[in-house]
Amino acid sequence: MFKKYYDRLLEQISIDYNCAPEDIRTKKIIITKSALNQGRRSYSPGVPFLQMATLGERTVIMADECLHEFLQDLVKDVDAHRLLEFDNLLKLDEEVKKYGYQMNHTHHMFLPCREICHEERFQVKWLYDSEINSFYGDQRFPNAIAYPTPCPVRPDRIAVIALDGDNIMGMAGCSEDAPHWQQIGIDVLPEYRSKGIGSYLVTLLRNKIIDMGDVPFYGTATANIHSQRIAINSGFKPAWVETEAVKIENDNSMGG
C-alpha cells in the first residue's frame, strides 16, 4: 500500500517543487526555481521564496534565484536529510532574513501504509462540503477544519463527528490541498480524550478517502507526539518532512 501512495507523492512533490519525478528518484539534493505550478499544494500566498522537503535520502529545495548561490554552497558535502536539522535550518533562517523572511516550522507528513479498520465503537455523523459551514469559527475544531473561516485554496471536503447522544466528542476533517490530495486533521474535546476517539475518526475518514480513490495524508508538528501516535494507530507512517520561509510581518503595534 505504501509504495502506491509514495509513487503518487513523488508526482505531487514534483508539481509542488517544480521538478520532475525522475529527478527526485535519482538525485540526492535538487535545487529548483520558484514557480506556481498548476495543481500544487499552496499554504502561503504568492510565489514561494523558499520551500524544502526531504524524503530521507533525497531533498528538494525550491527557491528564489537570489538564494541559489547560497544554497549551492550550503548543500556541498551535506547528507540530504540533514538539511532539515537545526544547524542548517539556522543558516537558512539567517540568510532568508536578509530578504525579509524567516523559516517556518517543520512539518512531519504521513501516508497510508497498511489496511486497517475498527469495529463500530461510537455513533458518528458524516458531513460533506457545504454541510460543514455551520462549524466555521467554532473554537473546538481548529485542526479538523479551516479556522475561523473557509479556505478557498484548500476547501474542506468531508468531516466525521463522534457523538455522545447529542454531544460532540470529536471531529476529523479533510481539506483538498491539491486535486485528490486530502489532508486529515483531528480535534477531540478535552473531556473525551484518551478513549481512542481520535484514532477511530481518523481511520474512518482515511478509509473513506481511499474508497473515493483520493490520497489521504496527515501532517503534524515535530514535537506533537500525541498526534503522531494517532497517525500511526490509524494506519499511516512517516513519508516526508517539509518546511518553508514565510514573510516577516511588520510589527506596528507601537504606532507612530
Image (cartoon, grey):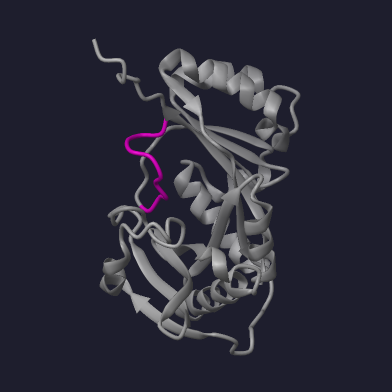
Q: Residue at x 36, y 64 (%)?
A: 156
Which residue ends up furthest to the top in the rendered image?
Answer: 256
Q: Is residue 167 above or below residue 19?
A: below
Q: Residue at x 42, y 33 (%)?
A: 34
Which residue ends up furthest to the bottom in the rendered image?
Answer: 120
Q: Is residue 178 visible?
A: no
| Towards the viewer: 134 or 79 | 134
Q: Is residue 80 visible?
A: yes
Which residue ends up furthest to the front in the rendered image?
Answer: 191
User: Is 6 placed left or right of 247 in the picture?
Assistant: right
Q: Locate residue 75: give its quadrant.
A: top right
The residue stretch that appears in magenta: 39-49
| Towards the viewer: 106 or 143 | 143
Which residue ends up furthest to the left in the rendered image?
Answer: 256
- Number of numbered discs overlaid on the protein picture: 0
Q: Is residue 87 above or below residue 13?
A: above
Percent position of residue 60, x then y: 58, 38
Q: Is residue 158 magenta?
A: no
User: Is 131 placed left or right of 48 in the picture?
Assistant: left
| Towards the viewer: 150 or 23 | 150
